[in-house]
Image (spheres, rainbow, N blue to C red):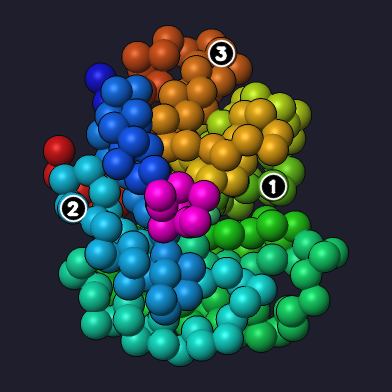
Amino acid sequence: MMLVDVHCHLTDGAMRATLADVIKNAKESGVAVIVTSGLGYEDCLKALEISDYRMIFPSFGIMPYELEGYESVLNLIEKNAKRIVAIGEVGLDFHISVRSNKELQRKVFKEFIDLSLSLDLPLIVHSRSAGKHALEMLVECGAKDAIMHAFDGSASHSLIGIERGYFFSIPPSVVRSVQKQKLVKKIPLDNILLESDSPALSPVPGEVNLPSNVRISAEAVSRIKCIPLEKVEEVTTENAMRVLRIRA
Ligand SMILES: [Zn+2]
């Protein structure tokens, strides 16, 4: 059996020094594929550098509240369209702590959505405190393949995405989030993927999260939906390989 971590940040300082161990540990836990998402120009180059296209695959994006230099990320995506498996994370962040301009966020998100369509690449979408807004923009812009990462919106809003065939990737923090548990209950297994978002969203608050913890996400999905773990592994892996166009 194998698991896919569709979204994490292996280039983050919290993991970089121990990267070899992190990957070994993921392999031993049954993780066969990891998508590492670069955030901003320099980090995207690092993500490319550590990708081996057997287990580690890169995606290029930028945090919606740190958009300085986003044009260079758009260019980098175009130049490396054949070397990346997704555009992301990109999206909207309307959290109260974020002071960045919402209109600018929308404008830039639209540019990334348009690019995903012209390059035929899936999007990994960040939508903190903006789940409904992000989903509505994706639908409006006609986005084809979208992975809603760590979606924090309501289960009823997720329907907008489910109808469109979008995916929702479930992080290990599901074990301590009632909102994510409700989401898992609502979303059909055919629309579910697994992510770690490591080093963030650990099952234990304050701990450094690791890609091996996607197993914890898989077990939670199995428990919440009363579906055998093997079935959860099989379907989420199939979903991930299909949307990311990775051949086993
Ligand atoms: Zn992330």
Dot 1 or dot 3: first in sequence order is 1
Nearest the viewer among 2 and 17 is 17
Residue position for label 2: 52
Q: Residue furthest right?
A: 96
Question: Residue at position x 30%, y 41% from top?
Answer: 20
- The three-letter code of the residue at mark 3 reads Arg
Cβ of disc 1 within 8 Å of ligand 1? Answer: no
Dot 3 or dot 2: first in sequence order is 2
- The three-letter code of the residue at mark 2 reads Asp
Which quadrant is home to the N terminus? top left
**Residue 86 inside the magenta-drawn segment:** no
Magenta-colored span: 8-17
| 167 displayed left or right of 131 | left
Res 71 visible: yes
| 240 displayed left or right of 199 | left
Question: Residue at position x 74%, y 79% from top?
Answer: 100
Helix, strand or loop at label 3? It is helix
Compared with 97, 202 (above or below) is: above
Residue position for label 1: 152
**Residue 16 inside the magenta-drawn segment:** yes
Compared with 34, 38 (above or below) is: below
Helix, strand or loop at label 2? It is loop
Helix, strand or loop at label 1? It is loop
Mark carried by residue 242: none
Is the residue marked by circle 3 packed among few (<14), some (14-19), or many (20+) residues within 10 Å?
few
Residue position for label 3: 223
Question: Residue at position x 53%, y 79% from top?
Answer: 110
